[in-house]
């Protein structure tokens, strides 16, 4: 049995009275004792008010306390500083320094009444506190980021948040990012000085990206008319925030860059956006760039905001992407492919096509996509910039061209060749669109494209489209994003063409079945013509059933097979009336042979499917599947084929889960088309 103490993830707060030795020397131990007693009482009361907080150690001139949340620790530190600053104090006033860090700690028995807290996290918290000067609160990165989000506009608006860069702390192997928080106007902008136990490790080109950091309720330096609302995301470049213009209520997205080496990506994105706008004009399916600040910090790109958020956000508010009709999902992807194709037409490759980079807005009551974030995009031909008088400042042109490898981007949507370091091409974006198509069809935007993905897509046509996009060999992949958009928009026509092929085969099968049934009836008649009189009645009944089946097949042949619904005179009404008549005859005329009735219902169901009347097609296919199963068994080819018909229909009705269940229950498998 493992007797080691359990580790816990806690937020540790270390306090210490700044200049305590000099203060004791000046006022004496007795006076200092009174000050420290009040100090202790104040801190203990603040910790007691915070749920889940506890004091771990009393160090004499300070405390080590643990909190459940970063926001709780920061709020307690601020209240403690405020209480010490307000007084009233007689004579001298204590000033404390505070360090906060989050990590795992263990409690071990030291033989006394109180357990001792051990762990690297406690050492880091002590080092961070030691770096602070009097009146200062320093935090490590995780605490800083969490607290900024949790302390809302009402609490956080009066606060300032700053980044001071990395420090090498004694006893800690890796550099630690140090940040500060304090009341607005009182937080120093200069980084902590450092000491022999904490040395600053910031390169010269990083200085410009440090300092101010966004938080809810804060104004943006240089754009004070905008107030920050909430953080939308994080990337290697920095952070993305939603802001609102106070007077107009207009919302914008601000993409802040806090990494010096990522400023090149900012400049790259600007160049690509300008090229797209210059060559193609403003497009509703590509996000627009409004303002740019790259001259002085904070550096940012300001772009438009869509109320519905990205594709995943939009879908989540509708109960998940599986709840959205399949036709709507496919339309969104076709329009996204249009945007990708437009960018490709001017030599711009996106390199990071994924749901979070597809914003959704509403036009004429319908959802529409808008492709965003060209931050890692590249050009296939640098001459495009010169053609449109665009200057690529701040980076070399080689960083903007297709000579870069296909690496980077989001792994889930990256093409296989990205692992080989080969140049990225248009087929890389096509691959990403194929993964998105797969996710949209199955109704799961988080599902990776793994081995056996084909089993998840019941519709054979959509399965072909996904396969064409995600082919492992780029040369055999779908030629362009434009071709994918065209294929998706042509889906109804492609289904009709497929239907006609199956319809003709079904008619021939029914005719052959009828001929076989007639031959069998004739043979039966010749073989049993000399039997007893009682057998004659049964024989005549069988022949009657055959004639009834022949009459029904004739009806279907005359009313359906001879009419092409796409070009029939009188339009859909004539075909619909013919189908309704055929169903009425089918329901009223008893057929004792299940396989015959199943074949007839199969034909009628396919006609309904061709016309887009999916609910009626479902009724006929379900009846035919039941009849085929009863007559021939679950493994019969006709039964398997009918399971496929029903699964495709369910997919068209927007029921992917039920389609998958039916396909698997019917043991469906892919069959080659003629």
Image (spheres, rainbow, N blue to C red):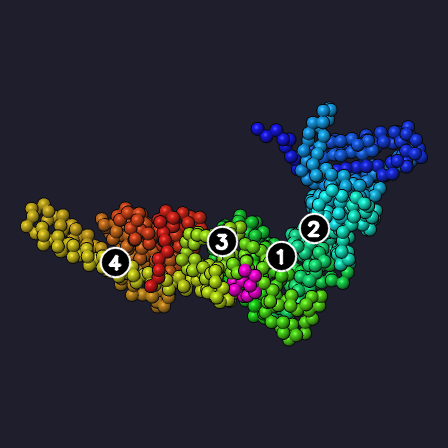
| Image quadrant occupied by the C terminus | bottom left
Helix or strand or loop: what does disc 1 sit on? loop
Q: Are marks 4 and 2 in contact (CB under 8 Å)?
A: no
Q: CA distance from mark 4 to mark 2?
A: 67 Å
Q: Which mark is residue 306?
A: 1
Residue at the image point whose x is 16% and y is 57% from the top: 519
Chain-order first, disc 4 or disc 2: 2
Locate residue 600, reporting x and y percent.
Answer: 28, 55
Helix or strand or loop: what does disc 3 sit on? loop
Residue at the image point whose x is 37% and y is 60% from the top: 610
Locate residue 344, reporting x and y percent.
Answer: 56, 68
Q: In front: mark 4 or mark 3? A: 3
- Tell me, yes or no, if residue 49 can be seen here: no
Locate residue 607, reporting x and y percent.
Answer: 34, 59
Q: In front: mark 1 or mark 3? A: 3
Q: Are marks 2 and 3 in contact (CB under 8 Å)?
A: no
Residue 1 is inside the magenta segment: no
Q: Are marks 2 and 1 in contact (CB under 8 Å)?
A: no
Chain-order first, disc 4 or disc 1: 1
Q: CA distance from mark 4 to mark 1?
A: 55 Å
Chain-order first, disc 2 or disc 1: 2
Residue indicated by mark 4:
510
> Which portion, as a residue range, is magenta?
420-430
Residue at the image point whose x is 31% and y is 57% from the top: 603
Q: Are marks 4 and 3 in contact (CB under 8 Å)?
A: no
């Amino acid at each position: 049995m493992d007797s080691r103490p359990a580790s816990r993830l806690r937020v540790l707060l270390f306090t210490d009275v700044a200049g305590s030795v000099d203060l004791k020397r000046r006022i004496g131990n007795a006076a200092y004792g009174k000050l420290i007693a009040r100090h202790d009482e104040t801190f203990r009361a603040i910790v007691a008010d915070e749920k889940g907080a506890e004091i771990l150690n009393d160090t004499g001139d300070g405390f080590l306390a643990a909190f459940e949340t970063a926001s709780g620790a920061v709020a307690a530190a601020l209240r403690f500083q405020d209480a010490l600053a307000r007084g009233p104090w007689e004579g001298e006033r204590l000033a404390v320094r505070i360090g906060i860090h989050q990590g795992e700690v263990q409690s071990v028995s030291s033989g006394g009444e109180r357990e001792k807290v051990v762990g690297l996290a406690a050492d880091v918290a002590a080092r961070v506190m030691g770096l602070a000067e009097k009146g200062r609160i320093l935090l490590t990165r995780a605490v800083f980021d969490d607290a900024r989000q949790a302390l809302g506009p009402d609490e956080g608006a009066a606060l300032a948040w700053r980044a001071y860069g990395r420090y090498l702390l004694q006893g800690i192997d890796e550099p630690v990012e140090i940040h500060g928080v304090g009341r607005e106007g009182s937080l120093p902008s200069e980084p902590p000085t450092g000491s022999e136990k904490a040395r600053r490790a910031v390169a010269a080109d990083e200085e410009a990206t440090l300092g101010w950091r966004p938080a809810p309720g804060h104004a943006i330096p240089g754009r004070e008319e905008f107030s920050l609302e909430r953080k939308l995301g994080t990337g290697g470049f920095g952070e993305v925030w939603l802001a609102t213009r106070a007077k107009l209520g207009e919302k914008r997205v601000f993409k802040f860059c806090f990494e010096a080496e990522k400023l090149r990506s900012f400049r790259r994105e600007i160049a690509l956006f300008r090229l797209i706008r210059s060559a193609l004009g403003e497009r509703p399916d590509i996000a627009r760039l409004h303002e740019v600040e790259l001259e002085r910090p904070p550096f940012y790109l300001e772009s438009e905001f869509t109320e519905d958020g990205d594709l995943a956000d939009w879908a989540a508010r509708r109960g998940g992407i599986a709840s959205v009709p399949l036709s709507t999902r496919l339309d969104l992807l076709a329009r996204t492919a249009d945007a990708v194709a437009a960018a490709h037409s001017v030599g711009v490759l996106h390199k990071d096509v994924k749901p979070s980079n597809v914003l959704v807005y509403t036009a004429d009551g319908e959802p529409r996509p808008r492709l965003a974030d060209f931050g890692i995009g590249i050009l296939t031909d640098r001459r495009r910039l010169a053609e449109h008088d665009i200057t690529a400042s701040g980076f070399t042109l080689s960083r903007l061209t297709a000579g870069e490898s296909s690496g980077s981007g989001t792994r889930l949507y990256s093409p296989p060749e990205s692992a080989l370091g080969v140049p990225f091409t248009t087929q890389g974006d096509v691959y990403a669109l194929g993964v998105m198509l797969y996710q949209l069809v199955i109704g799961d935007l988080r599902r990776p494209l793994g081995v056996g993905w084909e089993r998840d897509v019941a519709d054979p046509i959509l399965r072909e489209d996904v396969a064409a996009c995600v082919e492992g060999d780029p040369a055999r992949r779908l030629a362009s994003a434009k071709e994918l958009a065209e294929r998706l928009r042509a889906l109804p026509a492609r289904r009709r063409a497929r239907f006609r092929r199956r319809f003709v085969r079904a008619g021939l099968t029914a005719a052959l079945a009828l001929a076989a049934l007639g031959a069998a009836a004739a043979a039966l008649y010749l073989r049993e013509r000399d039997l007893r009189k009682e057998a004659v009645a049964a024989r005549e009944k069988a022949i009657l059933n055959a004639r009834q089946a022949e009459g029904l097949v004739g009806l279907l042949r005359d009313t359906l097979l001879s009419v092409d619904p796409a070009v029939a005179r009188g339009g859909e009404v004539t075909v619909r009336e013919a189908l309704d008549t055929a169903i009425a005859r089918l329901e009223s005329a008893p057929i004792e042979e299940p396989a015959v009735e199943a074949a007839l219902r199969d034909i009628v169901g396919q006609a309904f499917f061709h016309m887009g009347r999916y609910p009626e097609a479902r009724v006929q296919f379900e009846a035919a599947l039941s009849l085929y199963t009863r007559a021939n068994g679950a493994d019969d080819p006709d039964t398997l084929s009918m399971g496929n018909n029903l699964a495709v229909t369910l997919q068209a009705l927007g029921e992917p889960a039920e389609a998958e269940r039916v396909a698997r229950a019917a043991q469906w498998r892919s069959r080659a088309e003629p």
